[in-house]
Image: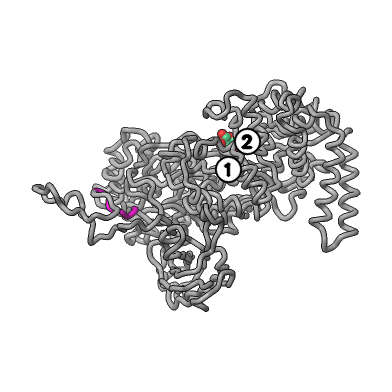
Amino acid sequence: MKGLPYKLTGILLLAFVLFSCAGNYASEYEKQRDQKVETLLQEMTLEEKIGQLMQKNGEFPQLREYIEDGLVGSILNVPDPKRVYELQRLAVEESRLGIPLLVGRDVIHGFKTIFPIPLGQAASWNVDLVEDGARIAAIEAASQGINWTFAPMIDVTRDPRWGRIAESFGEDPFLNGVFGAAMVRGFQGDDLSNPNTIAACAKHYAAYGWAEGGRDYNTANIPESELHNVVLPPFKMIIDAGAASIMTAFNEINGIPATGHVPLMRDLLRQEWGYEGVVLSDWRSLEQLVIHGYSPNEKEATYEGMQATLDMEMVSTGYETYLPELIEEGRIDESQIDDAVRRILGMKFDLGLFENPYGLGEDFPELLHPSHLEASRQMAIESVVMLKNEDVLPVPEHVRSIAVIGPLADAPHDQMGTWVFDGEKEHSVTPLQSIREFAGDNGLEVYYHRALQLSRSKEITNADAILRDVNRADMVLLFLGEESILSGEAHSLANIDLQGAQEELVELVSGPGKPVAAVIMAGRPVTFEKAEPYMDAVLYAWHPGTMAGPALTDIIFGKVSPSGKLPVTFPRHVGQIPIYYNHKNTGKPPSYESWVHIDDIPEEAVQYSLGNTAHYLDYGFEPMYPFGFGLTYSSFELENPELENPTLQVGDTLRASVVLQNTGDVEAAEVVQLYTRQLFGSLTRPVKELRDFKKIVLEPGQSREVVFEINTQDLGFHNPDKGFVTEPGDYHLWLGTDSRDGLKKEFEITR
Ligand code: BGC
């Protein structure tokens, strides 16, 4: 039992810590941990040190031998918990030094209990729910021996063509940071050494969401100010939340591949931000420095990775192959390797793996525990964004029969969305199942037609029977969208309209004139401007996860009100992309007064003033739905916006308040959003920036004062020539329920 000495030391350490240092736990703990790391490091051969830097895929043929020889620091993608246990046992009991393995897995939005895709979670604007969801995912994963997840993904993106938008928290840096930090807290808990926690790995550092044209892995060209003001802030926020690790990105950024990006990794992340956690490459992304055309061969890629302070290599083998000779040649100093090993061992100690390498073990907890399913249902409910409702939802009492139609009404796998390695469709409850159950209990008739085998099928099956049933039903519930395979990694689309014959299907079912409520499940914003007029209500449900059925049934039949808000702008047409709320003003901002629509250009016109502002002749300048937008079954009013002090100095706290009233007939939640604008700056500033939000539940007639406190320091931005600056001058502030409207106040920051 080679691992035993560490177990004993662990117990002694714990006893020491508990008995000796009430108020000084963190630093005392760190001191002890670092001493243990140093002791272990002294005993390691160079080969063993390099071994710690290697992450091996579960399918690697010589995995057992490598582990026994102490040449593996981490494994990923070993789905069978018995095999995980066995491999971990080999590391702890059979390798010379008994160093436990980091066991990695993509636990992205749930493990067995699948929660909505991250984009859907962001639409909940409910930070506590997102944290709880990650907590549950960690507990379920830890019960299978997993101790490291490759989440959260905090890649800000402005491009719904990009398949991985599904995995992000949308277009806003603040939302990505807030929800990323919530997930980090959920995965890691209060104490990473607790066996029911797992280490987070925030990704992808950096600018992966900036892929040109939304084509996955594509080049990211991004001005430094935008990189620092839009893409990097969420990374700073997850570091502050204690994220144990960070993953690099596949893309290049302004000519340098992210995995060997010395300025971003060594200089910014390590030196400026002081990040001491583990940095892991993405899948073979280190060797891809060669394919990018940056390093001439894998040896040079290895050199770049080390220079950039990349600690661990996922799957590719540059470090184990070339580090020994790079050291021999004196190009890499062994101390650089020691630093990487220190960070990796430190994470293993933090996770408590030397005391308990096996995680939660078999007796705890139940996967898919009822409380987990309930949390998933609540998150699915809160993630649904109602985009339109012309008095057809919730389903009124007089409706006695419903035609349920569409390829996503009963698609147990697809409702889980992308990145569900461990989710099983057998556990999904589909909308059709739940609606049938509700209908059975309430004496409703349900007529069901899938109509399209898949969302992308080009032919409607049984059109006559569909029409017959629509005619005899009191209303139609139409389940449209995208199956899960149409979003996710490498699953980008150039056309984001409703795929296949879905537009025809909408027209077909709306023919008889029955109310049509559409539920759209998708991994991205889809464009559906043509179909929208045929829909009397639209519920945008993303991919809601295991509990899609019960959650949507609760909303459709009025048990709860929808309360989600868009975390991303919805374009009307793919050609408008990038379209996002926090854009710059331009010198010629568009307006309806100045815009001439293409259809209104006189036929004889040769020279004609078309407004000379920043618009499209055909699509104008507005999105289909703005960021932050979402309706409820109630109505809300905001009044009495107040600023405690309209003149402040940098560092002062800005206190703003507004009264929110539920003026409708039902209980519902509204999200009050606070945006600011710096009117003039040393660099131009966006027209609006989200600074804070609060989700408030109110009974009919109830009102509440909603108070925000913001440190004026945080209203600053990065100017490449000056660093982070908070500039004196005039600012506007809006308190609203979406990014388009809001009650405006003005304030000034003085010197
Ligand atoms: C993805 C990562 C993921 C890794 C391991 C890569 O292709 O980009 O996000 O964590 O695979 O599955």
Name the residue rendered at 73%, 23% in the picture.
325
Q: Earlier in the sequence, mark 2 or mark 1?
A: 1
Ligand 1 - quadrant of the structure image: top right
In this rendering, would 208 be left or right of 387? right
Amino acid type at mark 2: Ser
Classify mark 2: helix, strand or loop. Answer: loop
Amino acid type at mark 1: Tyr
Q: Decide: is 15 above or below 100.
A: below
Name the residue rendered at 56%, 63% in the picture.
714
Q: Residues within 10 Å of mark 2 (few under 14, many from 20)?
A: many
User: Residue 671: within the magenta?
Assistant: no
In this rendering, would 179 be left or right of 9? left
Can the viewer see residue 467?
Answer: yes
In this rendering, would 507 be left or right of 257? left
Q: Tell me the residue that label 1 is attached to.
A: 205
Region rendered in magenta: 618-623
Q: Quadrant of the N terminus?
A: top right
Q: Tell me the residue that label 2 is attached to.
A: 281
Q: Nearer the viewer, residue 645 or 6?
A: 645
Question: Outermost residue, top direction?
Answer: 61
Residue 665: horizontal and vertical position, in percent?
A: 41, 71
Can the viewer see residue 412?
Answer: no
Q: Nearer the viewer, residue 351 or 650?
A: 650
Classify mark 1: helix, strand or loop. Answer: strand
Q: Nearer the viewer, residue 150 or 319?
A: 319
